Each structure stands twice: as structure tokens, then as C-alpha cells.
């Protein structure tokens, strides 16, 4: 029965006589030793190498088994290292227990060998991990500390906390987290620290005021995580001083408000001046028409034509300024629009341009889905693009055309406006949307395409250009369908 018990034990176990000769062992012992001993011959010390926890060989009379046989007392928790025949070493805790005959004499002993190699390796890894995290804690560039959940007492602080808050390590460890809070914040801190009310998955605990040793109050962003620290429920805290950031945000917000006010005043001024300028232009055009009707002199009519051309350019410029001002002053007024009706209407309205004569128009826009957008802004985009296509067409071409193709779907309007006019050299493709940019030798305000791009962005769209000098221009436009949800 005794033998069966030893054989069935899952841990390495063997027994020996008073001389230390092994008389019984189990399979777990063989697995631990890496060899099978010879019964009645091998002794615990001679059969394999045994070293103590200082990695020096033990002598026979100092072994755990020898001591147990000699003194009759078990010796516990004396770690040894067993070296197998293949050189593999195992950390072991031996538990020798002597047994006696009926006369009370020691006749042998039984010993259990607890293999703690994996435990030792885990402890080693844990020490490495603790050392690594200790380093990260101590050398973190932001203040960190650990406090108890019950009393908020500081259990540990890092170097940066000491540096930024002005307290020594000893002072910190004699304080609680309440001591670095202004009086007005203490009750709120206590309430917010209730673990039952904290979302454990949310480590960001918001922005707080902290009190430094010199009395300075700083705004900090707190990151916290509950942990067990040396068996005590605790909270690991990282404090990020955002005082400078908050000041910068306040200054930026102030500057932004001032800029918005300035821009608003400038927009109102531009809008007012533009309106005031158009009134006398209308009067001048009226007088010019009267002169052209009444005069028969060729020089006078020639000069009148030059004046009219200059006034029209100025009027176009003012209209563009008004469009730009309206773009920035007013919000979107979304409505359902008829695409074909708008395209044909704009083309018809531009036929009075002197360059429009002889241009063939192809308009094919498929309204697969109703399209919604801001009508005035949409018209501004089309008028600028189509009038530019007319204005910068080749005068000598016999087959001059402007083609407008597109379709609307649930998400967008896709448009292509193409002409076979003078074209734009590739090196200017990125510059044409700049305010006041004009190609050398060409008339125009230099603001039209700037307004087009700005308006398209407001309408949540995009524009691309394909063009070569002398080979025409194609604009590809995509606008979001702003249909009501």
C-alpha cells in the first residue's frame, strides 16, 4: 500500500535506508533526475549532482537528506539545484521526512522533491518586468504617482512629479492627493474618485486644477488606472500640464473671434462698395448708349466702344466681388433644381458676348435622380466657367464648340465642360485658381476661377482641369447632392 501510494504520487518522491541508499522511487522522480537509479546501490548524493542555492556543490553531510537522517527532523524550504546527465538544471525544494522503527530509531527517510523551475523562471521574468516598468515610471517625462483608493495617500511618485510640483519625495509620501488640490476642488475630487461611479474603460479623467508647493495653480489633464500595488487597491495617475496649451487655445479663440469680426466687416464693406459702384456704371452705360445713337462720327463710336468694353470689364469684376462677398456672408439655401433648364438659360444669357458668335453648344445632362444644391452658387460656378470658355475661344476656328455633359445620381452631380479654345499650359494648372491670377496678355479680373473653386468647396464638391496650350480645356466637376434626408 505504501509503495502504491508513492508510485501514484504526481510529484517526485523516493525513500532511502539509514545509509542513504535508494529503496523506492516513482516515475516523477525519474523524470526529474533524468535517469533511473539502481535500487539498494545508488544513494541520493552519488547518483546525480546536487548543488545548493549558491551554486556550489553540497557535501554529503550537509544535504537535506543527510541532515534529516542524522537529526531526525525534516528540513524545509532549502532550495537546491539538480543537474541532469544532459546538463539541464532544475530548481528543486526538497521535503525530507525521516521514519522510525518501533524502538524510535531512524531507519530511513522519504523525500518529496518539488520542481519549482517554472516558478523560478516566472519570478525572474516578473522581476525583469517590474524593473522595466519601474524604469518607465521613474523616467516618464510626465509626472506620475500612485495613491491609495481609500485615503488618497501617496504611495509612490516619479522624478518628474518631484521636479514639477516642487515637493521632495519624502514630502509627497507624507501627503495625500487632496494636498495638491485647491480648496474649492477637494469635495469634487472626493466625489469623482468613487470607484463605483468610474467607467473603468475610460482612463481619461478630465481636466483638473493642481496646486504646486509654491502656490501656483496649473491646469492638468489626468489619466488614471486602478491597480493593485503591493497588495493595496491603488490608482496609477499620469498628470499632463496643459496650462500653456489652454492659454494658447484661449488666445487662438480670441484671435479667431477678432478675425471673424474683421472679415465680416470687410465683407460688408466690399458688398456695400460694390453696390455703390454699380449704380454709376449703369448711368454711364446709359449715357454711352445715347452717344452711340446720336453720333455718326467714326472716331466717337470707336472711343465709345472702347469705353463700353472697359466698363463691362469693370462691371464683371464688381459682379465677381459681389459673388465672393455673398459666398462668405450667406449660408446655403438648398433647393431642387432643373439642370437642363439652368444650363440652357445660362448659355442663352451669354449669347450677347461678342466672342459667342459662331460657337456650337452641345448640352446633354441626364437627371437620373433629382439634384439639390444652392441655386445662386451653382449658377455662379456655371456662368464663370461657360463665360470663360466663350471669352477664351479661338476666333479663327470654324468648328468652335462648347460641350456640357453630365448626370446626377443619389450622391452627386458629375459634370464635364469642354471646349476647343486656346487652352491652358500645364504649368499654370495649379495657379489658375489663385486670386487675381491672369494669363499673360489676357483680359479678365483674375478672380473668376478663384470664386469657382471656393464656391465648389462650399457646395461640397471638387474641380479638376485638363488642358494643353492650343488644344482646348476640359473642367471636370463633382458636386454633392444635398438632398434632404
Image (tube, rainbow, N blue to C red):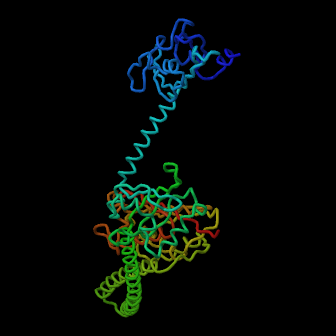
Which corner quadrant holds the N terminus? top right
From the viewer's perspective, is 5 left or right of 325?
Answer: right
Relative image position of residue 470 (x, y in whole percent): 36, 58
From the viewer's perspective, is 455 left or right of 16?
Answer: left
Single out the residue that lies furthest toward the front.
Answer: 103
Is residue 133 positioned above or below 83 on the image? below
Is residue 427 positioned above or below 483 on the image? above
Dividing the picture into quadrants, the one containing residue 36 is top right
Q: Which of 106/392 is in front?
A: 106
Q: Which of 423/482 is in front?
A: 482
Which corner quadrant holds the C terminus? bottom right
Relative image position of residue 210 (x, y in whole percent): 41, 69
Q: Which of 239/8 is in front?
A: 8
Dividing the picture into quadrants, the one containing residue 174 is bottom left
Q: Residue at x 51, y 55 (%)?
A: 234
Is residue 458 positioned above or below 170 on the image? below
Q: Residue at x 64, y 21 (%)?
A: 9
Relative image position of residue 313 (x, y in whole percent): 36, 79
Relative image position of residue 377 (x, y in whole percent): 50, 74
From the viewer's perspective, is 324 left or right of 18?
Answer: left
Q: Which of 297/119 is in front?
A: 119
Is residue 255 positioned above or below 25 on the image? below
From the viewer's perspective, is 86 left or right of 297?
Answer: right
The total number of labels drawn is 0
Amino acid at each position: 500500500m505504501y509503495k502504491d501510494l508513492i508510485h501514484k504520487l504526481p510529484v517526485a518522491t523516493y525513500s532511502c535506508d539509514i545509509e542513504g541508499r535508494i529503496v523506492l522511487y516513482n516515475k516523477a522522480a525519474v523524470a526529474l533526475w533524468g535517469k533511473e537509479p539502481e535500487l539498494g546501490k545508488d544513494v541520493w548524493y552519488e547518483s546525480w549532482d546536487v548543488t545548493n542555492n549558491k551554486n556550489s556543490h553540497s557535501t554529503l553531510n550537509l544535504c537535506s537528506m543527510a541532515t534529516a537522517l542524522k537529526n531526525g527532523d525534516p528540513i524545509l524550504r532549502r532550495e537546491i539545484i539538480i543537474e541532469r546527465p544532459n546538463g539541464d538544471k532544475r530548481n528543486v525544494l526538497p521535503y525530507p521526512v525521516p521514519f522510525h522503527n518501533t524502538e524510535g530509531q531512524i531507519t530511513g527517510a522519504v523525500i518529496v522533491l518539488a520542481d519549482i523551475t517554472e516558478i523560478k523562471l516566472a519570478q525572474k521574468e516578473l522581476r525583469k518586468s517590474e524593473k522595466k516598468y519601474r524604469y518607465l515610471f521613474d523616467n516618464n517625462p510626465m509626472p506620475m504617482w500612485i495613491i491609495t483608493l481609500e485615503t488618497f495617500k501617496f504611495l509612490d511618485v516619479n522624478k518628474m512629479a518631484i521636479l514639477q510640483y516642487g515637493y521632495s519625495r519624502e514630502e509627497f509620501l507624507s501627503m495625500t492627493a487632496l494636498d495638491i488640490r485647491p480648496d474649492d476642488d477637494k469635495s469634487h475630487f472626493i466625489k469623482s474618485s468613487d470607484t463605483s461611479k468610474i467607467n473603468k474603460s475610460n482612463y481619461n479623467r478630465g481636466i483638473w486644477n493642481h496646486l504646486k508647493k509654491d502656490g501656483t495653480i496649473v491646469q492638468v489633464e489626468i489619466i488614471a488606472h486602478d491597480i493593485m500595488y503591493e497588495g493595496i487597491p491603488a490608482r496609477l495617475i499620469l498628470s499632463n500640464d496643459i496650462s500653456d496649451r489652454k492659454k494658447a487655445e484661449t488666445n487662438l479663440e480670441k484671435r479667431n473671434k477678432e478675425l471673424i469680426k474683421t472679415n465680416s466687416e470687410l465683407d460688408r464693406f466690399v458688398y456695400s462698395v460694390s453696390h455703390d459702384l454699380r449704380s454709376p456704371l449703369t448711368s454711364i452705360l446709359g449715357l454711352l448708349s445715347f452717344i452711340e445713337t446720336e453720333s455718326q462720327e467714326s472716331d466717337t463710336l470707336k472711343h465709345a466702344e472702347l469705353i463700353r468694353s472697359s466698363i463691362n470689364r469693370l462691371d464683371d469684376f464688381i459682379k465677381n466681388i459681389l459673388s465672393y462677398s455673398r459666398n462668405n456672408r450667406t449660408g446655403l439655401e438648398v433647393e431642387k433644381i432643373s439642370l437642363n433648364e439652368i444650363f440652357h438659360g445660362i448659355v442663352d444669357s451669354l449669347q450677347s458676348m461678342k466672342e459667342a458668335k459662331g460657337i456650337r453648344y452641345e448640352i446633354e445632362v441626364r437627371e437620373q435622380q433629382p439634384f439639390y444644391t444652392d441655386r445662386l452658387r451653382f449658377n455662379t460656378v456655371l456662368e464663370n466657367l461657360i463665360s470663360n470658355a466663350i471669352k477664351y475661344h479661338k476666333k479663327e476656328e470654324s468648328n468652335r464648340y462648347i460641350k456640357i455633359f453630365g448626370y446626377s445620381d443619389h450622391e452627386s452631380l458629375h459634370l464635364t465642360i469642354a471646349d476647343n479654345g486656346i487652352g491652358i499650359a500645364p504649368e499654370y494648372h495649379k495657379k489658375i485658381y489663385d486670386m487675381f491670377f491672369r494669363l499673360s496678355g489676357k483680359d479678365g479680373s483674375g478672380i473668376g476661377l478663384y470664386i469657382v473653386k471656393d464656391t465648389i468647396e462650399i457646395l461640397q464638391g471638387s474641380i479638376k482641369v485638363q488642358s494643353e496650350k492650343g488644344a482646348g480645356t476640359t473642367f471636370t466637376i463633382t458636386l454633392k447632392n444635398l438632398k434632404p434626408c
